[in-house]
Image: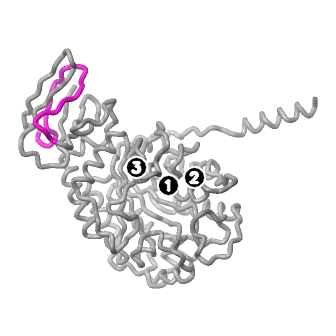
Amino acid sequence: MKRIAFLILIVLTSVSLRADYVPAKENLESRQTFEGFRFGIFLHWGIYSEFAQGEWYLNNKLNKDEYAKAATCFYPLRFNASEWVRAIKESGAKYITFTSRHHDGFSMFKTAESKYNIVDGTPFGRDVVGELADACHAQGVRLHLYYSILDWIREDYPLGRTGLTTGRTPRPNYDSYFQFMKNQVRELLMNYKDIGGIWLDGYWDHDADSIPFDWRMPEFYRYIHQLKPGCLIGNNHHTTPIEGEDFQMFECDLPGENNAGMSGQEISRLPLETCLTMNGMWGYKVADQNYKPVSQLIQTLAKCAAKGGNLLLNIGPQPNGELPQIALDRLKGIGQWMKVNGRSIYETKATDLPEQDWGVTTQKDNSLFLHVLKPSQTIAVSLDKKPKKVVSVADTTQKLTYKYDKRSKQLSIGLPEGINTPDFVIEVVR
């Protein structure tokens, strides 16, 4: 009897100690702001850019010590954080997510945890994260930081399914590695201005373990939120969100789609984000010039917003510190469209209307925005009542002919001839 009572006491104690995550007021405010952004730019940059073969180059049976020699000649003399942020801001993007440390273990910031960082380990000697944080703060752009929770060079990292051929001597000690991560994330959150979010990656490295690996993520999340309650946490684990996460991400697919095979999870009630490449790679690859046209990128942005998500569009900066000119051209093209049509994207919500043959819809307050991606002479949409006004967002003086059928509750709109935009946006005021 005493044993049973003791076991019950243990259970009750463990339950009482497991407090469900309740976001702080600052966190809820950050979520709302983040949802309103709808468009951000991802930047994958590290010493891997010198090899011009993408960010996974070390995983291609390279020795970590030979690879590390790239740090001794990393000198991106044309890097200018203010110019990067200015070009990104002019595209209409509201936030940047930057790779503070990728799977190769090299830190793009000054850290006390290792000399293998851009300040102590390169002739460049400048803190890229710090300069980006200052530039983002000055220009009113939010900065989030990507952080890899897997590492291909540290001996204390418990080996998963990648980074097995880098020449390290495994001495797995997750307590040691976990403390290393906590220390680095503390540096990122406490040493730089206005870090709005932490974007984690690498959880999938242990998805094939015979015994499930305990990453201790809830503990990690609590630590981050204790440091900065308003900091948003997302984890690119390709599964249902874990307790303590503040937004849900989808890799290479829009929410609800799974064409790339990494985003089959259900859609949560958290803010949503889709990360996509502008060409075919995340990190810079000299041979990959297959950039998506501006028209496709604009339409993807509209489709993402229509699903209630943010689009995080990736660029791989060059080893000399410049953003590729072709990427800058894409940013400029998106920015020209956003200057005219941005209010149909920013701070909008998904609607109950499914994707139509002609396009998608977003909404804000009393306005329904019709994003016509495939123009025809007439388009139709279901509407509960006759609208007060139907206008082109690009030119509110442009009269559009329309008819409303009360019986079928169908709104039919005649489109002007010669539409020359990848997304002709119509505002229907209800």
Q: Residue at x 41, y 58 (%)?
A: 97
Residue where numbered disc 2 is placed: 224
Residue 137 appears in view: no
Name the N-terminal-most of marks 1 and 2: 1
In magenta segment, residue 69: no
Question: What quarter of the picture does the C terminus occupy?
Answer: top left
Furthest residue in direction top, as rendered: 407
The reply, left or right, for residue 138 in relation to residue 269 is left
Quadrant of res 187: bottom right
Find disc 1 in the rendering and name its residue.
198
- What kind of element bears circle 1? strand
Q: Quadrant of residue 292?
A: bottom left
Q: Check the image and name the residue furthest to the right.
A: 1
Whether the residues at callouts 1 and 2 have beta carbons within 8 Å, the answer is yes
Query: Which badge, 2 or 3, is on the more N-terminal residue?
Result: 2
Residues drawn in magenta: 375-395
Would you name the residue on which mark 3 appears? 259
What percent of the width, then of the height, locates residue 158? Answer: 66, 64
Closest to the observer, 346 or 356: 356
Judge left or right: residue 412 versus residue 161.
left
Which percent across, then down, holds residue 328? 25, 65
- Quarter of the picture holding the N terminus: top right
How far apart are labels 2 and 3 at the CA level?
A: 33 Å
Q: Label 3's element?
A: loop
Label 1 to label 3: alpha-carbon separation:
26 Å
Closer to the camera in the image, 156 or 396: 156
User: Image point 15% across, 27% down: which residue?
Assistant: 412
Q: Judge whether residue 21 can be spotted in this image.
A: yes
Q: Is residue 383 magenta?
A: yes
User: Badge 2: how crowded within 10 Å, few (<14), some, or many (20+)?
Assistant: many
Q: CA distance from mark 1 to mark 2?
A: 9 Å
Q: Is residue 207 above or below residue 49?
A: above
